[in-house]
Image: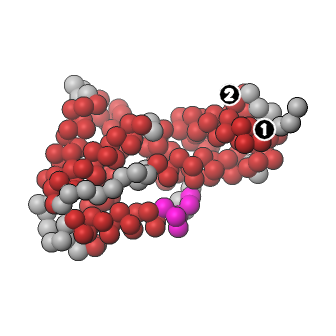
Amino acid sequence: MSWDTEATRRKLLEAATLQFACVGLAGARVDAISREAAVNKERIYQYFGDKAGLFAAVLATEVEHLLEGITVTGSGADALGNVAGALYDSAAAHPQLARLLAWESLELAEPVSAERRAAGCAAMVTALAEALPQQDRAHAAELLLSLISLALADRCLPHVAALVAPGSTASSRRAAVVAQARALSAIRG
């Protein structure tokens, strides 16, 4: 029977994603990841070098979901609302994403896949600047950061969200994020 390297890597990445999202790089344990994946822990070292290499691989895989498939449609308030809604939906579809981004910022000196991610962000900034002709590129970049913050806030800070808006539901939060994003279009840079 031949060894399915790709399936083994996928199992390790899936188990590691859950571990890292819950407890970060420092809190995750190689033994727990290998046990959850039902794979010998030596495969982690063989495929990823070490736990930090596995964390980087998880981040490189998962953080690509942040802007994946999101396009700027419409102009002005519509464009910002559409992007914010799509970001919120992406965060809901990838619940570990916000936590992984937070752990990355807390535990690493530099972002993983920075060049590729920066290019994706730059493309989104360009599209937003085109959808908001009254704004310059620098303001469009600030708007994108605000949209990402709005869309991920309740997933990064669930306790704060529960304290501030205890009756909030996913649909009411999404509607609030979209409305707040639309209001941002009126702010001049």
The furthest residue to the top: 167
- Percent coordinates x, y for residue 106 in the rendering: 50, 51
The quarter holding residue 72 reads bottom left
* Within-10-Å neighbours for mark 2: few <14, some 14–19, many 20+: some
Report the residue at 52% width, 64% height from top.
Answer: 116
The answer to which of 120 and 180 lies nearer the viewer is: 120
The answer to whether any part of residue 30 appears in the image is: no
- Percent coordinates x, y for residue 28 in the rendering: 63, 37
Position of residue 139 relative to residue 174, above or below, is below
Q: Secondary structure at mark 1?
A: loop
- Percent coordinates x, y for residue 101 in the rendering: 47, 49
Magenta stretch holds residue 115:
yes
The furthest residue to the front: 1
The answer to which of 72 and 49 lies nearer the viewer is: 72
Q: Secondary structure at mark 2?
A: helix
Q: Amino acid at mark 2?
A: Glu
Using residue 142 as the reference point, say whether residue 15 is left or right of it: right
The part of the chain drawn in magenta is 112-117
Q: Amino acid at mark 1?
A: Asp
The numbered disc on residue 4 is: 1
Report the residue at 69% width, 52% height from top.
Answer: 53
